[in-house]
Amino acid sequence: MTTQPLRVALLGAGTVGAAVARLLQERAALLTGRTGRPLELVGVAVRDTSRPRDGVDPQLLTTDAESLVDGADVVVEVMGGIEPARTLIERALRRGVPVVTANKQLIAQRGPELHAVADEAGTVLHYEAAVMAAVPVMAVVRESLAGDEITSISGVVNGSTNYVLDLVARKGVPFADAVRQAGELGYLEADPTEDLEGLDAAAKIVILARTAWGLPVSLEDVQRQGITGLTDEDFRRAAAHGAVVKLVASAWRSGTGGSDHVEVAVRPV
């Protein structure tokens, strides 16, 4: 074990970022034992350093994300959005610095480009948390099933809409009220359209499909239908048949005559 610390730059200090910062400090001994080097959080890039972040040392906050990235051995990006996240991640990768991100929309939209940059620089881009948070589904698809032939993937990948639909099915809450409650509890994105219209689930199934088959898949390929068009009558009809409504993301490999391709869909079923 070396005593030279591994310098970690954290981009973003929202709910997820602040939790990452706290865990890096609270579990320092455990992480040192597992990595073989002490992990040192050298800074947290934010837009406003005057706003307090629960459990994050104010001295670590900075608005100079570029300098923070340039001085790091590992970059963790949890700021979300496409820019400046893409530019900062690419900046780190071009320096040969490994990047860990939970940014599903960025990976869904620009993942292949960023992977190409990482490969050229001889480094890695990881995004396990971009799909189903702490559930290691990416590792299952990429590693555990490496010796198997995956023909299709299907599941509930958006917890926010699942909470809404569960309120309706199990507690009889009217659909509109369930959406409002989920928003008030902070379960929906600031722009709830990303969850309710299936955009979040679409990004996740695109990432899973690429990982499973190594074929080009984009958000434009997703046959997408969200849950905003559902009515209370839809839920009553499902209940009458002993069923519940779920927003399901699916991907399947198809094609004949050498035209191998992947189809992807997000729809309530």
Image (cartoon, rainbow, N blue to C red):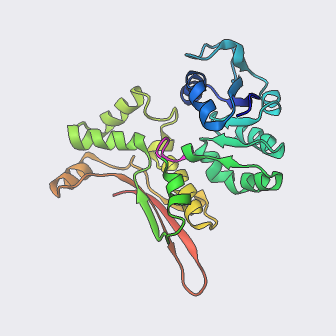
Residue at the image position 51 percent from the left and 47 percent from the top:
200
Name the foreground residue: 243 vs 135: 135
Q: Is residue 57 above or below residue 149?
A: above
Image quadrant where residue 213 sits: bottom right
Residue at the image position 70 percent from the left and 42 percent from the top:
99
Image location (x, y in percent) of residue 231: 29, 47
Q: Is residue 32 above or below residue 116?
A: above
> Quick one: quadrant of the C terminus?
bottom left
Chief secondary structure of the magenta span? loop
Please say whether residue 188 is visible from this viewpoint.
Answer: yes
Magenta residue span: 130-135
Name the foreground residue: 27 vs 241: 27
Please say whether residue 14 is visible from this viewpoint.
Answer: no
Residue at the image position 61 percent from the left and 84 percent from the top:
258
> Quick one: quadrant of the N terminus?
top right
Image location (x, y in percent) of residue 255: 54, 80
Image location (x, y in percent) of residue 225: 44, 55
Whether residue 119 sits left or right of residue 125 in the image: it is right
Residue at the image position 22 percent from the left and 41 percent from the top:
170
Q: Is residue 141 above or below residue 32?
A: below
Whether residue 85 sits left or right of residue 20 in the image: it is right
- The residue at the far bottom in this view is 257
Image quadrant where residue 168 sits: top left
- The question of residue 13 being in magenta is answered with no
Whether residue 172 sits left or right of residue 203 in the image: it is left
Q: Is residue 45 above or below residue 227?
A: above
Image location (x, y in percent) of residue 100: 65, 41
Name the foreground residue: 110 vs 57: 57
